[in-house]
Image (cartoon, grey):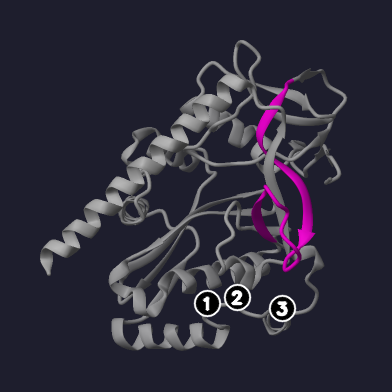
Amino acid sequence: MPQPLLRHATEEGRPQWPAFSTDAFLDVIRDVYRPGWRKAFVSCAGQAFRTLVSPRGDPLVGLWEFPLFFESVATAEQVTPVPYLDSVCHGITTAGGSRRPGLAASPFIDWAGVTGSWGEYVGGRTHALGTDGFEARLRKERALNRDAGDVEVCFDDHDPGAIETLFAWKSAQYRRSGLVDLFSLQRNRDFYGELARRGLLEVATLRAGGKLIAAHAGSRLDGRFLYRLPAYDPQFRRFSPGALLTWRLVRHSFESGDREFDFLLGDEAYKFTYATHVRWIGPLGTEPLRRKAVRTARGFAGRARRAVRGRLRASAVHGRR
């Protein structure tokens, strides 16, 4: 069980909370997804969390449009008991250890534990199975520079076309995978737009010969970089442009003095090339039967839709033969 995170003041005098419990994120989530909700402290299974609650006092759960998780906090303020939360941190282990059954991995780099230079950090890492090693990435970057033109990286690109292109690439990726296209929903675009408007979004871009070929949208809160939305132009797949941009982002985080580079939810192999630790995320408490029934029905419907899409794709391929 992770220790509760203690509230303390930043240099600007603001209280500091875990990333998804900050005023910054909770305000945007409220304004885009949960109008009328308020920030509050809740307790579940003996732990306290800072989140949003509805006018009826229900905590924020089921926000599938923008997956997040909460970490327990220590507070002397009034706390409302709730029976269930769906995504909380149950503990932290070093990367490479055994899995926690029933929990989802959220890998991250704890820069406080990394001593020495960038070269020493890279030299001590082992690339994950099925991913390029660091030398292979450098070779691909040189090949991209040779074949497509000078490679340029911008870590805070304000070109409005960059985020729109990122949405388009990500939409196409969701559709190819048979998943719900999150960016066909305007509120999800609005969410990132609100993050940008409030200075909470950093769009990093990788261009070759002036052409945009990879991008990432993330956030930096109190020295914790949140790696959220990567995508690339599939025409340049052979150069692994997404991996090249991730490599640059991780190094930029190291050199910027961040406390942490957080890959967030997902156990994709490439994250473990860099990660030093893993947060284990899952439900807490007893899920109300009504909510469980609704969630189960939605899961069944989603699997059915993906199965139909798979059969349609297979039929289309067979028809072209």
Q: Tell me residue 9's x, y (percent).
A: 81, 39
- Name the residue carrying label 1: 131
Q: The residue tagged with tag 3: helix, strand or loop?
A: helix
Crowd tier of the residue under label 3, counting other residues whose Cα lies within 10 Å: few below 14, some 14–19, many 20 or above: some
The answer to whether the residue labelled 2 contacts the one labelled 1, judged by CB atoms less than 8 Å apart, is yes
Q: CA distance from mark 2 to mark 1?
A: 6 Å
Q: Specify the quadrant that holds the N terminus.
A: top right
Q: Tell me residue 297's x, y (percent).
A: 46, 30
Q: Nearer the viewer, mark 3 or mark 1?
A: 1
Q: Looking at the image, which residue is at 60% across and 75% down?
A: 128
Residue 231 colored magenta? no
Among the two numbered marks 2 and 3 on one chain, the one whose residue lies closer to the N terminus: 3
Residue 160 in sight in this render: no
Crowd tier of the residue under label 1, counting other residues whose Cα lies within 10 Å: few below 14, some 14–19, many 20 or above: some
User: Magenta segment range?
Assistant: 82-108
Quadrant of residue 56 within the rendered picture: top right
- Name the residue carrying label 3: 121
Q: Specify the quadrant that holds the C terminus.
A: bottom left
Q: Tell me residue 243's x, y (percent).
A: 48, 72
Q: Tell me residue 6's x, y (percent).
A: 85, 39
Is 2 situated left or right of 272 in this image?
A: right
Q: CA distance from mark 2 to mark 3?
A: 15 Å
- Name the residue carrying label 2: 128
Question: Which amino acid, mark 2?
Answer: Ala
Q: Looking at the image, which residue is at 65% across and 32% down?
A: 23
Question: Which amino acid, mark 3?
Answer: Tyr
Question: Which amino acid, mark 1?
Answer: Thr
Most extreme residue toward the top, as rendered?
A: 56
Crowd tier of the residue under label 2, counting other residues whose Cα lies within 10 Å: few below 14, some 14–19, many 20 or above: some
Quadrant of residue 69 within the rendered picture: top right
Q: Which mark is residue 234?
A: none
Quadrant of residue 26 within the rendered picture: top right
